[in-house]
Image (cartoon, rainbow, N blue to C red):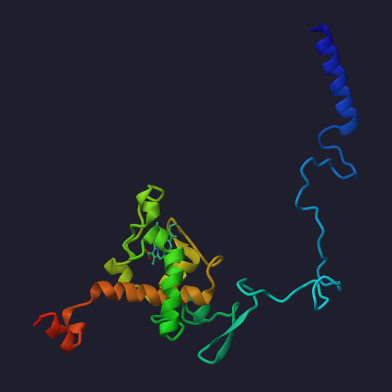
């Protein structure tokens, strides 16, 4: 026991001697048994180098990343992402009212894209049909998930749904950081199609189809 205390005291002195006390300042690099990722080879911004083919360390935004300055064409007009424009905010320019209709023309291409993105980002909670019975509800990770066929939600303006998808609402988080703006509008368009699929009546069918199904 005596030896243990002695050896322990010597060890403490050695460690304090080498490593110093907590809070001491040093110009030396800290000892890293597993290298820290913040110290690694990197390119300084705005410098010339031979790493990239064009010689610049700062590269243009890569496909799939979401740039703050990016502009997009909406109805033939260039709109920057920082502008107070309906396509960015879901609201009427200079007002707080939501826009009624999608900021993009609803095409088959937009709907196909929206279908895909809805199934990736929204279906885990809202379910592929939008009834709010996705996997997170089934495993008990989310207690209440909105049924997107609720009268109240069907009646919301497109801009408000875009705003919810972007910034979240209540316990739902926003997806502006994960889903590009174009895709959020595509999801809104697809959600409208989903809602319509629940609201269909026999009168929507062509007369031939109704005759075939024997509906008067
Ligand atoms: C992690 C689970 C989760 C995901 C993923 C999710 N939601 Fe939600 N969403 C919720 C919950 C929970 C609510 C109810 C929020 C509340 O009322 O507190 C909700 C509510 C909503 C509402 C109703 C808002 C209102 O005005 O009451 C809309 C519209 C909606 N979500 C759309 C979407 C869309 C579009 C996506 C995909 C981009 C999405 N959600 C992804 C959980 C989720």
Q: Residue furthest top?
A: 2
Look at 23% across and 77% down and name the residue there.
Answer: 200
Vertical comparison of 87 with 168: above or below: below
Where residue 205 sits, quadrant-wise, is bottom left
Which is nearer the eye, 26 or 6?
6
User: Could you tell whether 156 is left or right of 110 in the image?
Assistant: left
Q: In this orientation, which residue lies closer to the viewer: 167 or 55?
A: 55
Q: Residue furthest left?
A: 216
Q: Is residue 29 above or below residue 22?
A: below
* Quarter-of-image position of residue 119: bottom left
Question: Which corner quadrant of the image does residue 130 belong to?
Answer: bottom left
Q: Residue at x 12, y 85 (%)?
A: 211
Q: Position of residue 165 (x, y in %)?
A: 46, 67
Residue at the (10%, 80%) spot, across then down: 214
User: Residue most toward the bottom?
Assistant: 76
Does 40 sit above or below residue 99? above
Q: Pinpoint residue 62: horizontal percent, then vertical percent.
A: 66, 74
Residue 14 image position (x, y, % from top left): 89, 25
Q: Is residue 206 visible?
A: yes
Could you tell whether 216 is left or right of 28 in the image? left
Q: Is residue 96 visible?
A: no
Which image quadrant: the C terminus?
A: bottom left
Work out which quarter of the rendered image holds the N terminus and state it. top right
In this image, 19 relative to 101: left or right? right
Image quarter for ligand 1 equals bottom left
Please name the residue shown 46% across and 70% down the image: 117
Count of picture labels: 0
Residue 21 pos. (x, y %): 84, 32
């Amino acid at each position: 026991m005596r030896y243990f205390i002695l050896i322990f005291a010597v060890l403490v002195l050695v460690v304090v001697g080498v490593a110093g006390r907590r809070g001491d300042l040093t110009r030396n690099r800290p000892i890293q048994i597993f290298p820290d990722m913040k110290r690694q080879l990197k390119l300084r911004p705005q410098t010339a180098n031979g790493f990239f083919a064009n010689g610049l360390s700062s590269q243009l935004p890569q496909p799939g990343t979401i740039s703050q300055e990016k502009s997009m064409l909406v109805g033939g007009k260039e709109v920057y992402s920082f502008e107070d424009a309906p396509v960015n905010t879901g609201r009427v320019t200079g007002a707080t009212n939501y826009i009624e209709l999608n900021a993009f023309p609803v095409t088959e291409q937009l709907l196909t894209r929206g279908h895909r993105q809805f199934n990736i980002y929204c279906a885990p909670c809202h379910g592929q049909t939008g009834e709010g019975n996705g996997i997170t509800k089934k495993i008990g990770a989310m207690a209440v998930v909105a049924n997107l066929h609720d009268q109240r939600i069907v009646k919301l303006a497109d801009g408000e749904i875009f705003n919810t998808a972007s910034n979240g609402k209540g316990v739902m988080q926003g997806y502006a950081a994960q889903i590009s703006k174009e895709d959020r509008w595509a999801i809104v368009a697809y959600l409208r199609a989903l809602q319509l699929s629940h609201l269909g009546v026999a009168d929507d069918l062509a007369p031939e189809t109704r005759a075939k199904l024997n509906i008067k």
